[in-house]
Amino acid sequence: MGISFKAGTDDLRYSPVVDVIEKLIGKGFEVKVYDKNVHISRLIGKNKSFIKEFLPHLDKLLTEDMQEVADWAELIVLNSGDKMFRELKVGGGKEIVDLVKYPEFMDLPGYEGILW
């Protein structure tokens, strides 16, 4: 949930999660990404060049429905401070890695908050 380096931007150049996604895919994991600010057709300049070099298949990973991603995933990584993620419905049995600090999810089994 969220691939840009901070909420409200489509800049992916400083986002550590780009590297994480690349490594997960390289190890054979299926990945879906939701970020309402990132649209491949709108990327320009260095941002576009960065994605072409480091995650050229991002267009195949992006999904336009955050709940669809949450329902599909076994592991949800919260990488953006966008307030909309607070309304995410997370079903049982899901693992959550929270890189931002969402109190709404802290009591769920499978929750792990790191890097904050």
Image (cartoon, rainbow, N blue to C red):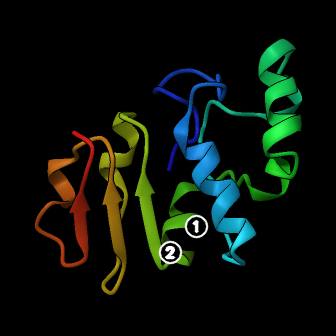
* 112 sits to left or right of 41: left
Measuring from the top left, give residue 12's x and y in whole percent. Answer: 65, 29
The mark tally for this picture is 2
Q: Give the amino acid type for the residue marked by disc 1 in the picture.
A: Glu
Residue drawn at (44%, 65%) of the image: 76
Answer above or below: position of 67 versus 52.
Answer: below
Viewer can see residue 15:
yes
Which label was assigned to residue 97? none
Displayed quadrant of residue 3: top right
Q: Classify mark 2: helix, strand or loop.
A: helix
* Residue at the extreme left: 107
Answer above or below: position of 88 versus 36.
Answer: below
Q: Classify mark 1: helix, strand or loop.
A: helix
Residue drawn at (10%, 67%) of the image: 107
* 64 sits to left or right of 2: right
- Between 77 and 49, the residue placed more toward the observer is 49
User: Which residue has dot 1 on it?
Assistant: 68
**Marks 1 and 2 in Cβ contact (< 8 Å):** yes
- Between 12 and 83, the residue placed more toward the observer is 12
Displayed quadrant of residue 47: top right
User: Which residue has dot 2 on it?
Assistant: 71
Measuring from the top left, give residue 35's x and y in whole percent. Answer: 59, 41
- Between 94 and 22, the residue placed more toward the observer is 22
Q: Residues within 10 Å of mark 1 (few under 14, many from 20)?
A: few
Answer above or below: position of 80 versus 27.
Answer: above
Q: CA distance from mark 1 to mark 2?
A: 5 Å
Q: Quadrant of the C terminus?
A: top left
Viewer can see residue 90:
no
Q: Give the amino acid type for the residue marked by disc 2 in the picture.
A: Asp
